[in-house]
Amino acid sequence: MTASKLIVEPENTPASEGASRPKPRQCVSVIIVSYWTGPLLVRSVLSALRQPEVSEVIVVDNGNWADEMTRLSAIAGENGDKLQIISGHGNVGYAAGCNIGAKAATGQFLFLLNPDAILPDNAVAELLAEGSKLEGNWLMGGKLVNPDGTEQAGSRRSPLTPWTAFVEMTRIYKLAPQHPYFRRFNMHQDPCPEETIPIPVISGACMLMPRDTFFAIDGMDEDYFLHVEDVDFCLRLRDAGGEVYFSPVTSIPHFKSSSRSSKLRVEVKKAQSLVRYFWTHFRKPYPAVFLAIVSVLVWVVTGLKALRILLRRALRLVGLRRRTGGESTRRARRISSRSSSR
């Protein structure tokens, strides 16, 4: 059997237009947007295909290694219509990739999953069971963990405001760590709740929601090319009367930074997204002067990170520093090899 592949050309159709969307079914569609992910992509896809509640896995190919796509095509051929690969649109960014996948999905529930996150057995069933207790438009994330099992930063978060960003960038939280005004953005160091609770922000690496919830707020904002689109999505959903939840019932390993994309470009895109987010949502409650100060700080921090990246590259060129990420890549290949042999 040949691989099932759907080619999607670039389009400007809003995610909210429902005329061309398939009729939803009573099941889960997993959407994985991938850009030069490497060996972990196959492991992530296989972990989603194993979930009994998942009717389809949609991989939105923003650009990947040829050998990884060959492996995926072979898996698609073995799984009939359950694995769909959407290609041909180029690197449109994460938010736009999610919208492409959502419009092609047929499930009643959408599950946005990062290509370097691995679903344990029964993960979808456990999150769906928690979701069955909720009403209205809701969004739920699981407990993201590092390879060593510790909870990952970003798994659950406070609201991202210009002030919380200022606290993070200036590190003034060290003056009074317990003071509510100096509360940090990421909450992974707080005691983990024992049951599902409302939370302001969860990570886009793992998002489960009813299909209607996604389209109720027109999907992801495609003006965010990379980073902050998940924070923006949570904010807009809550502003529209929906609710965001964090559930500790399942722990999902997330390896992070598996993409081989340029670290410099990633930092620039992140800075652009942060500045856009602040000026889009906080013009009224915050003075323009403070927003400008925070925006400048964002770019200063980005510049310092860029200098660090360039310095590391220079040291590697003269042989004074081992190439970073090598061990992570080798570990990912070992994991992928183990999964493909099952």
Image: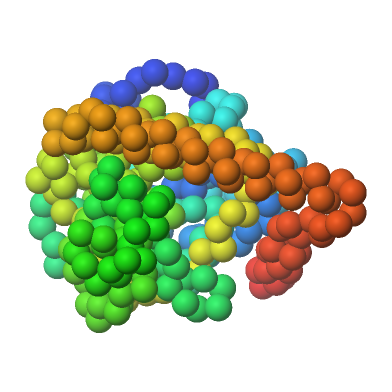
36 with respect to 50 (left or right): right
**Up-down relation of residue 296 to residue 3 (above or below):** above
Residue 66 position in % (x across, y down): 74, 41
Residue drawn 83% across and 51% down?
316
275 with respect to 266 (left or right): left
Identify which residue, 167 or 210, lies in the foreground. Answer: 167
Q: Is residue 5 shown to the viewer in this render?
A: no
Identify which residue, 317 or 58, lies in the foreground. Answer: 317
Q: Is residue 290 shown to the viewer in this render?
A: yes
Q: Examine the image and state in which quarter residue 276 appears.
A: top left
Residue 16 position in % (x across, y down): 25, 28
**Up-down relation of residue 149 to residue 179 (above or below):** below
**Up-down relation of residue 151 to residue 277 (above or below):** below
Identify which residue, 313 or 22, lies in the foreground. Answer: 313
Farthest residue, direction right:
318
Residue drawn 26% across and 30% down?
289
Residue 209 position in % (x across, y down): 27, 53
